[in-house]
Structures are given as structure tokens and as C-alpha cells.
Image: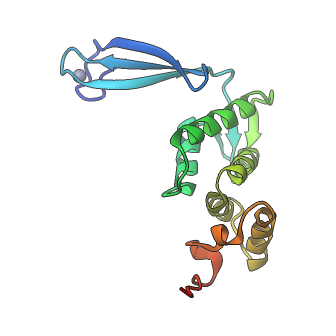
């Protein structure tokens, strides 16, 4: 593994331990050339998975990209990073275990929506608004309705720019 700081080729593994409930190996590495320390993860990849985007373009499944889109939805939300990491791993495992070598991006979107719904209502609405590409207010109302049963309404309306009106402050 090349050193990310000095590009030296002689980095050494100082420590290896299982993580993410034994789904990954975390390795601490050190570069003898510059003293740089960094961490790498080893994960199972059951097969190469290709994602078919809405445009029809095919791209390799990218776990990091999935993680980034979820992190954007969860920005500044009080959610434990370990839970987020487990959620991402869970989605990746579900995708890999579907037995398809190609999947439409809508399948990933569906898994993310499902996972976020149970994790954080605000993140769910944020992701849904991008993923579903809300064209009408009715679409937004529909998503709010889907989570209203399980979530206090204040948690949904609070701080969400798309909600349409500012919070009433009567204190
Ligand atoms: Zn180095």
C-alpha cells in the first residue's frame, strides 16, 4: 500500500483487527520513509457490481460514493457514526447478495430510503427530496405522510428548507 503522504512504497502494517461486526479488517499502517500513519479497511467484495444510472450509463458500484450521499443527507444530524457505517455496510451486503451483476440505481435509492426511514426522519426527507426529484408539492406531502405515523411531526418540519414555511415560535 502506497503512503498517501510521500508516495513511499514501503509502508508497514502495525496493527490489524476485525471491525464492523467482523465484516471488515481495519489496519493501522506506518510509512518508514516519512513517519506518516494511516488506516486501511479490507472488505469482502462478492462480485463486481455494476450500477445502471437513470441516464442509462453503467458505472461500477462505489461504496464510498454511497457513503458520501448518505453523509450529505445526515449532515449535522445527531446520529452515531458507527450506526451509519453499519447501515452502509448493510446496504452494500444487500446489493451484493441480490445475485445480479447489474442493478438500476433506483434499487440502491430504495435501500437507502428504507434504511434512513428507521434512522433519522430529517435525513430521510432530505435524501428522498433529491432521490425522488420532487416535482410537485404533492410528492413532498406524500413522503411526509409516509413518516408521519412513526415520527413526531416537529422532527420533520424543523429546519427543513423544503418544508415551505418557517417554524412557528410561540415561546
Ligand atoms: Zn510516507
Residue 11 drawn at (x, y percent) = 30, 14
Callout count: 0
| Ligand 1: quadrant of the figure | top left
Identity of the residue furthest to the bottom in this view: 170
Q: Is residue 81 above or below residue 74?
A: above
Q: Is residue 60 visible?
A: no
Residue 17 drawn at (x, y percent) = 48, 15
Which residue appears at 58% of the width and 82% of the height? 167
Q: Between residues 81 and 96, which one lies in front from this camera angle?
A: 81
Quadrant housing residue 148: bottom right
Residue 40 drawn at (x, y percent) = 43, 24
| Colour style of the rendered protein structure | rainbow
Identity of the residue furthest to the left in this view: 34
Which residue appears at 34% of the width and 18% of the height? 29
Q: Between residues 121 and 106, which one lies in front from this camera angle?
A: 121
Identity of the residue furthest to the front in this view: 171
Q: Is residue 144 above or below residue 40?
A: below
Which residue appears at 54% of the width and 44% of the height? 80
Image-based side of 141 in relation to 7, left or right: right
Give the quarter of the figure containing the N terminus: top left
Q: Is residue 84 above or below residue 27?
A: below
Quadrant housing residue 73: bottom right
Q: Is residue 83 visible?
A: yes
Quadrant housing residue 65: top right
Which residue appears at 42% of the width and 18% of the height? 27
Residue 6 drawn at (x, y percent) = 22, 26
Amino acid at each position: 500500500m502506497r503512503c498517501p503522504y510521500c508516495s513511499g512504497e514501503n509502508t508497514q502494517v502495525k496493527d490489524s483487527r476485525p471491525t464492523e461486526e467482523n465484516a471488515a479488517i481495519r489496519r493501522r499502517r506506518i510509512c518508514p520513509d516519512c513517519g506518516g500513519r494511516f488506516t486501511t479497511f479490507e472488505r469482502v467484495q462478492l462480485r463486481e457490481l455494476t450500477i445502471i444510472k437513470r441516464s442509462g450509463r453503467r458505472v461500477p458500484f462505489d461504496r464510498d460514493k454511497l457513503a458520501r450521499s448518505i453523509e450529505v443527507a445526515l449532515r449535522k444530524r445527531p446520529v452515531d457514526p458507527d450506526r451509519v457505517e453499519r447501515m452502509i455496510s448493510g446496504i452494500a451486503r444487500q446489493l451484493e447478495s441480490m445475485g445480479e451483476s447489474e442493478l438500476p440505481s433506483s434499487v440502491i435509492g430504495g435501500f437507502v430510503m428504507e434504511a434512513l426511514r428507521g434512522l433519522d426522519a430529517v435525513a430521510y426527507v432530505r435524501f428522498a427530496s433529491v432521490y425522488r426529484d420532487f416535482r410537485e408539492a404533492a410528492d413532498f406531502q406524500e413522503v411526509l405522510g409516509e413518516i408521519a405515523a412513526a415520527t413526531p411531526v416537529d422532527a420533520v418540519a424543523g429546519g427543513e428548507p423544503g418544508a415551505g414555511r418557517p417554524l412557528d415560535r410561540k415561546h
